[in-house]
């Protein structure tokens, strides 16, 4: 048997570059290599004890049956309260769908909103899975390139130029994975002005990193006048609460979209994990101050990585305002031979760093930007200092 017996759908799908790099790093670790992994977007903190206690209580309370397809009502009420408290958005429980991670939320949206040939605008760099999720739903990703000179943010003019009669949606994240960029209220308002002229275009606003924000305030595009009825707000507990393995994501959306996502999820996976849902209620009801120690640590690590990378010739840097990534432009290394290895692109450079410096990063090509690499600083300061020292040594002549 071979891939010829598999569907065109799966044969045409790219493997997640972040997961592929993490797997390669694990492989080298198993072979005895001292790899420092900076490829995965996974907080290195343990979740707060009060969330663990809620999960234990749920086990004792026998939450072991199938959960409602769209999530427990009291969890959806907690999500609605969170939207109101943190985002000044008023979503009713009937507008909320809980899924097995924000990635499933995105897949649900694509499957219920896109038909063959519908175009989806993706400001690049974008999260690695957006493009293939859109393609799986028979949509057409339309990349809008940005650069480090504009802090990797799409302008209103670029958006206007990318819109065609086939444009159905725009997907973006703020704070952004992989760039750490945060759209301001003024920038979102400018995009909204363009979208106001195109009432049939819908917006997916991925806000999974909203609390890991170093500029003092997150803005949701659904809160911009005229955007609420056209926006699907995606969030979850993986990043802010270090609950990646608990797999809980959710959306707030117009009710007709929420119902469609529930219908699709009912035929796909049904309801999310019951114990994880009960733990998420505790997470979302807690004040944001309960995770402030993580946010402060990420802020310090960002500054450390920028300082140390800034001392290495060839790395062009901007100052990311959120998430836990830096996204340096490394195109100065292209066309050069370092330690006997030819560097033609960002993928070559990422592999070079893995093999020569034993540091795992991710090529920017996977995120729609071929000049950059993504470095996650969701690691200890000790590991980050050692990783930057190794990188500096590896690229030195």
Image (cartoon, grey):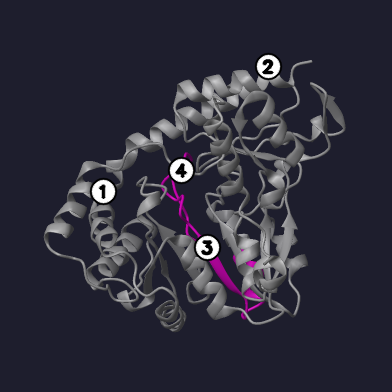
Mark with earlier residue (1, 3): 3
Relative to 278, residue 67 above or below: below
Q: Do the residues labelled 2 and 4 touch (CB within 8 Å)?
A: no
Q: Which of marks 4 and 3 is in front?
A: 4
Q: Is the magenta stretch mostly helix, strand or loop?
A: loop
Q: Which of marks 4 and 1 is nearer the N terminus?
A: 4
Q: In this view, does 159 lie to the left or right of 380?
A: right
Q: How crowded is mark 2: few (under 14 residues within 10 Å), some or many (20 or more)?
A: few
Identity of the residue drawn at 72% across and 50% down: 146
Residue 195 lies in the magenta-colored region: yes
Instruction: Tell me how far mark 4 sits from mark 1, CA to CA.
Output: 22 Å
Of the image marks 1 and 2, the number of the one nearer the N terminus: 1
Magenta residues, as a range? 191-220
Q: Which quadrant, please, contains the C terminus? A: top right
Q: Mark 4 points at which residue?
A: 42
Write down the residue under mark 1.
287
Q: Which label number is shown at residue 393? A: 2
For the residues carrying marks 4 and 1, which lies nearer the camera in this image? 4
Which of the 4 image quarters holds residue 253?
A: bottom left
Any part of residue 310 in sight: no
315 over 82 or under it: above or below:
above
Query: Measuring 26% from the left and 63% from the top, which residue is drawn there?
Result: 78
Q: Give the Cα separation between the discs numbered 4 and 3.
A: 20 Å
Instruction: Find the distance from the CA under tag 1 to the CA under tag 2.
Output: 43 Å
Residue 92 image point, x, y percent: 32, 75
Horizontal and vertical percent position of residue 301: 48, 28
| Camera-side residue of 298 and 72 | 72
Q: In this view, does 33 lie above or below 195?
A: above
Viewer-side label of 1, 2: 2
| Mark 1 Cα-neighbour bin, 10 Å: few <14, some 14–19, many ≥20 | few
Mark 3 sits on what residue?
A: 205
Q: Earlier in the sequence, mark 2 or mark 3?
A: 3
């Amino acid at each position: 048997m071979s891939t010829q017996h598999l569907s065109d759908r799966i044969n045409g799908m790219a493997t997640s570059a972040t997961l592929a790099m993490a797997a390669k790093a694990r492989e080298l670790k198993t072979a005895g290599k001292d790899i420092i992994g900076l490829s995965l977007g996974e907080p290195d903190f343990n979740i707060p004890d009060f969330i663990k206690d809620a999960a234990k209580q749920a086990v004792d309370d026998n939450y072991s049956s199938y959960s409602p397809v769209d999530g427990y009502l009291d969890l959806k009420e907690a999500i609605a309260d969170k939207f109101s408290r943190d985002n000044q958005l008023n979503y009713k429980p009937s507008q909320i769908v809980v899924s097995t991670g924000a990635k499933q939320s995105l897949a649900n949206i694509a499957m219920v909103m896109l038909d063959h040939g519908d175009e989806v605008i993706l400001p690049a760099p974008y999260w690695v899975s957006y493009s293939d999720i859109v393609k799986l739903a028979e949509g057409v990703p339309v990349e809008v390139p940005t650069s480090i000179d504009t802090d990797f943010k799409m302008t209103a003019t670029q958006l206007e130029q990318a819109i065609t009669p086939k444009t159905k949606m725009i997907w973006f994240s703020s704070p952004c994975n992989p760039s750490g960029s945060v759209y301001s209220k003024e920038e979102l308002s400018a995009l909204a002005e363009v979208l106001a002229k195109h009432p049939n275009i819908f917006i997916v606003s991925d806000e999974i990193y909203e609390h890991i924000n170093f500029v003092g305030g997150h803005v949701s595009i659904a809160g911009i006048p005229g955007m609420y009825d056209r926006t699907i707000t995606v969030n979850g507990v993986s990043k802010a609460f270090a609950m990646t393995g608990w797999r809980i994501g959710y959306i707030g959306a117009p009710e007709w979209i929420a119902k469609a996502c529930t219908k699709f999820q009912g035929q796909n996976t049904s309801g999310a994990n019951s114990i994880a849902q009960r733990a998420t209620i505790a997470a979302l009801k807690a004040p944001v101050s309960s995770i402030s120690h993580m946010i402060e640590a990420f802020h310090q690590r960002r500054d450390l990585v920028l300082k140390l990378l800034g001392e290495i010739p060839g790395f062009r840097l901007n100052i990311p305002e959120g998430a836990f990534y830096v996204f340096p432009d490394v195109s100065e290394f292209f066309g050069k031979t370092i330690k006997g290895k030819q560097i033609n692109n960002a993928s070559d450079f990422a592999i070079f760093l893995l093999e020569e410096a034993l540091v795992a990063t991710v090529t920017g090509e996977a995120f729609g930007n071929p000049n950059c690499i993504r470095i996650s600083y969701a690691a200890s300061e000790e590991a980050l200092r050692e990783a930057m020292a190794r990188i500096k040594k590896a690229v030195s002549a």
